[in-house]
Image (cartoon, rainbow, N blue to C red):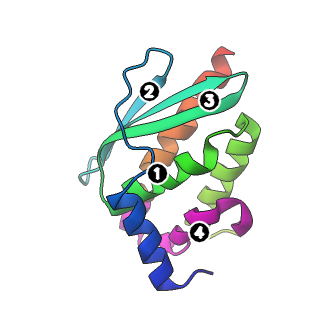
Amino acid sequence: MMDKEIKREIMLDHYNHPNNKMKIEDERYRSIHNASESCIDDITVYMLCEDKMIKDIKFDGIGCTICTASTDIMCDLLIGKSFDEARKILNEYYNMVDEKPFDEECLDEANAFDTLYQQANRIKCGTIGIHAIEDLINEYDRQQ
């Protein structure tokens, strides 16, 4: 389990300086818009895949710290992964957020959200981008 201060630093770093936040207008990318009915989170996730491999993921829009940081971290984790590898990471993340046993090693910085389940009203913030990423993987998979 990560130190509380380290978790805070990871989240703030990915919120203030996200690696993957940018609007994509390249037609090769597919996108999904996802917004919360109950808070500010309103993002679009863009994904480029080839041969069941994730080549790139970006996102744009407005999100709280948890939404932005969790989406950015997951983008970092999944770029370069096969769909099967990505699904395993996503499942482990969902297990963590649902307070189920999970594999810490495959989540890397996403472990910063290991106590998110304690704030039920913030779980949506921590999964809104993750669900969009999962939906895009499933969409690509259906069409390949």
Residue 96 in percent (x, y) is at 61, 66
* Crowding at mark 3 (Cα within 10 Å: few <14, some 14-19, many 20+): few
Q: Are marks 3 and 4 in contact (CB under 8 Å)?
A: no
Segment tinted magenta in the rendering: 102-123
Distance from Cα at disc 3 to Cα at disc 4: 24 Å
Is disc 2 placed on a helix, strand or loop?
strand
Q: Are marks 3 and 2 in contact (CB under 8 Å)?
A: no
Distance from Cα at disc 1 to Cα at disc 2: 15 Å
Q: Are marks 1 and 3 in contact (CB under 8 Å)?
A: no
The quadrant in which residue 8 appears is bottom left
* Crowding at mark 2 (Cα within 10 Å: few <14, some 14-19, many 20+): many
Up/down of 65 relative to 79, above or below: below
Q: Which residue is mark 4?
A: 111
Is disc 3 placed on a helix, strand or loop?
helix
> Which numbered disc, 3 or 4, marks the residue closer to the eye?
4
The quadrant in which residue 58 appears is top left
Is disc 4 placed on a helix, strand or loop?
helix
Residue 64 visible within the image? yes
Q: Are marks 2 and 4 in contact (CB under 8 Å)?
A: no
Distance from Cα at disc 3 to Cα at disc 2: 12 Å
Q: What secondary structure characterizes most of the magenta part?
A: helix
Residue 2 in percent (x, y) is at 58, 80
